[in-house]
Amino acid sequence: MEQLVDFWNRLTSIQIIDIIIAIGIIVFFRILSGTFSYIIIKIFKIKSKKAKEIKESAFYKPLKVFFIILGIYLAIVFLRGPLQINEQVMDIVTKAFQMISVIEIAVGLANSFTSKTILGKKLRKSLSEKMDDTVFEFVLKIVRVLIYIVAIFLVLTILEINLTGLIAGLGLGGVIVTLAAQDTAKNLFGGAMIFVDKPFAVGDWIQVDNYEGTIEDITFRTTRIRTFENALVNIPNAMIADASVTNWSKMEKRRYKTNLCVELNTPLEKLELLKTRIEKMLQERESVYDDSIIVRFDQITDNGINILIYTYTNSVDYASYLKEVEDINIKIMKILKEENVKLAYDTKTVYVKN
């Protein structure tokens, strides 16, 4: 109670002008925080002339927060004398200001290392021939993690925490942590193997066990797949590393295969003509590989004569592939109709004994 009375007595002795100045400092930095941030970014981004581009910079918002906190800190420093703030309190305030500054700088640096920022685009352009998009995104994530790790160590240093003892403690507890996080370690190792082997990339259409869809993201621990039912599945990287992965996006061509079973009484000359016309039709299609075309009478069954039609098309996208198959089937049906060749049906002759 005595402390509150003493504080009140000191507060009432402060000249009103000191309070007004302190509030003015806070308001001044609050109002002009955006302007200060804009000017600083403008200095370092000489080529940037658009205000929108500068305000979308990774450092713009962290700088605004920094200047607001700076205004509060300067106001407290200004009132230190009138309020007779002791060294311990000022030390706490100074450390808080330093920690917030470190965190905001770390946020700005981390936000700079993304594929959408100017820095990220410049790095991607310079490394375009050395690594693909998936590996590049992974490297950016590692850089961001390292930035935050450095920031944490700086904050611990500001708090005067003994880092040597902390690291030693982590070393002693490493075995326990390792045993408790075996699955996490497996997933991290699996993620590393994915980036080394490159079985797929973001945007690829893959199939893993019972999951099939498009890759949306690859993190340290999981791979995110958007299924064709529009569900988002997070698959542990360890499971993917041990599973057979089918990457449908890597197909260079798709196979077309069908069997035509025509009636047994179809004349041989008619069959030869039918085979020739189908081969010619396939050769005339730009999407079909000519050297892969096979049209042969491969079987004679009880029901009819089987004609195997086998080829490859460059329509690898599923929708375009279905369209290609439909077009080929329609043209085959037209040829059958024009040549008056009928398909055979699965029939059985049953003799009834009286």
Image: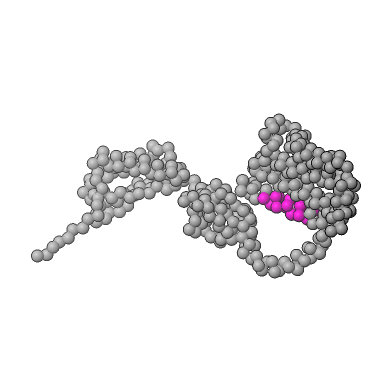
Residue lying at 58% horizontally and 59% vertically, measured from the top left: 236
Magenta residues span 141-154
- Would residue 40 appear left or right of 255 to someone viewing this image? right
Residue lying at 60% horizontally and 55% vertically, measured from the top left: 194
Q: From this viewpoint, which residue is outermost toward the left?
A: 354
Residue 328, horizontal then vertical, whole percent? 36, 42
Residue 277, horizontal then vertical, whole percent? 32, 40
Residue 326, horizontal then vertical, whole percent? 36, 43
Q: Main secondary structure of the magenta part?
A: helix
Residue lying at 33% horizontally and 40% vertically, measured from the top left: 331
Residue 144 lies within the magenta run: yes
Identify which residue, 272 or 334, lies in the foreground: 334
Residue lying at 89% horizontally and 46% vertically, measured from the top left: 13
Residue 223 lies within the magenta run: no
Residue 207, compared with residue 45, is above or below; it is below
Residue 132, compared with residue 243, is above or below; it is above
Identify which residue, 57 or 101, lies in the foreground: 101
- Would residue 115 appear left or right of 226 to someone viewing this image? right
Instruction: Examine the rendering and report whether any part of residue 282 can be seen.
Output: yes
Instruction: Examine the rendering and report whether any part of residue 122 can be seen.
Output: no
Residue 343, horizontal then vertical, whole percent? 26, 48
Total marks shown come to 0
